[in-house]
Amino acid sequence: MSYRKTLKLVCGLAGSSAVLVFAAAAADSRGYFGELRVEAASRWSKFTVLQAAQPAWTPANHTPAPTGHAWDFNWDKRDPSVLTNGKKKESSTEDPSSEQDNGKPKATRNILLIRHSQYNLSGISDKERILTPLGREQAEFTGTRLAELGLKYDVLIHSSMARATETANIISKHLSGVELVSCDLLREGAPIEPVPPVTHWKPDAVQYHEDGARIEAAFRRYIHRADAKQKEDSYEVIVCHANVIRYFVCRALQFPPEGWLRMGLNNGSITWLTIRPSGRVALRTMGDAGFMPPDKLTRT
């Protein structure tokens, strides 16, 4: 019996990828595929061995396994089912579930995080790091985009750093009647040591310690579900910085916060977080700058 016929018989009886791997490898090494051109035979043999070595397809081994913890619905410490305010009930017959329902948030908060526009990198002090002509143009594009969305904005909050303040002032011209508020907590900084580490940017431990606490305080102040007294959905614009925004996104989505530096943001881009009354959080857009012409895009 020829070797080729023996190979077919063995593979047909065994039905095993391991046997096929062994037989194909042996045939190739002994030159039994000599009638084919050498180069083609080599490619066929290698492909067959690799293909046979793959495990059989099953739904189980093609489904990623969960790697994190379950969603924490009380991430902002405002879950009404957990909150206790220590107030004395007026009547012993009062229904606890009714009290809880009255304290439940009913509105959705929309937080639009804007990264400041391009600025003068050669400036030594913050006051000298003002927007470039292109940066001012970018802010106009962002303001126009926000106005075109047709949303009823409640407030425009901005970092007190010069580049964020200037960006917010330009955007404000497109959002007539929206209150403008400055906040020191939103200033740029080093929120947490990134993983994996990078070589081009290495703040010292003290900066992480100080900036991290401040940026976390900003997150707790601005990123949370609506208060129970809020009746309508809200839209709030926050103009700040790339590090702050990326940290906010990781924290709000309950991703590892040390992964913040794995993302990038264009100048003047829009990142939109939606926070439901239940505590669920959705990222509607991340660093959207598609409303700008390609030649106006920067990431400085």
Image (cartoon, rainbow, N blue to C red):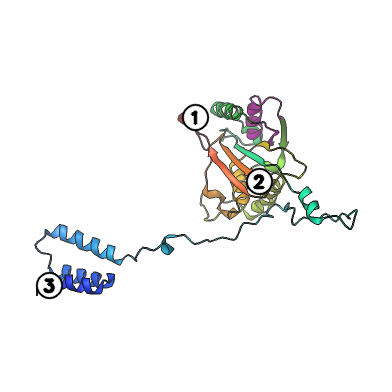
Quarter residue 148 falls in: top right
Spatial distance from mark 3 to mark 2, Cα to Cα? 69 Å
Kind of residue indicated by mark 3: Tyr
The amino acid beneath tag 1 is Lys
Q: Quadrant of the N terminus?
A: bottom left
* Residue in the image at 48% along x and 28% along y: 293
Q: Tell me if residue 193 can be seen.
A: no
Cα distance between the residues tagged 1 and 2: 34 Å
Where residue 54 sits: x, y (%)? 32, 65
| Amino acid on which the number 2 mark rests in the picture | Arg
**Disc 2 target residue:** 276
Q: Relative to the observer, which residue lies in front, 282 or 186?
A: 282
Residue 266 higher or lower than 37, as above or below:
above
Q: Earlier in the sequence, mark 1 or mark 3?
A: 3
| Structural crowding at the residue carrying mark 3, measured as other residues with C-alpha within 10 Å and reported as few (<14), some (14–19) or many (≥20) | few
Q: Which residue is mark 3?
A: 3
Question: Does 89 appear in magenta?
Answer: no
Q: Identify the magenta region.
A: 152-178
Badge 1, how many Cα within 10 Å: few under 14, some, many 20+?
Answer: some
> To which residue does mark 1 refer?
296
Dot 1: what SS? helix
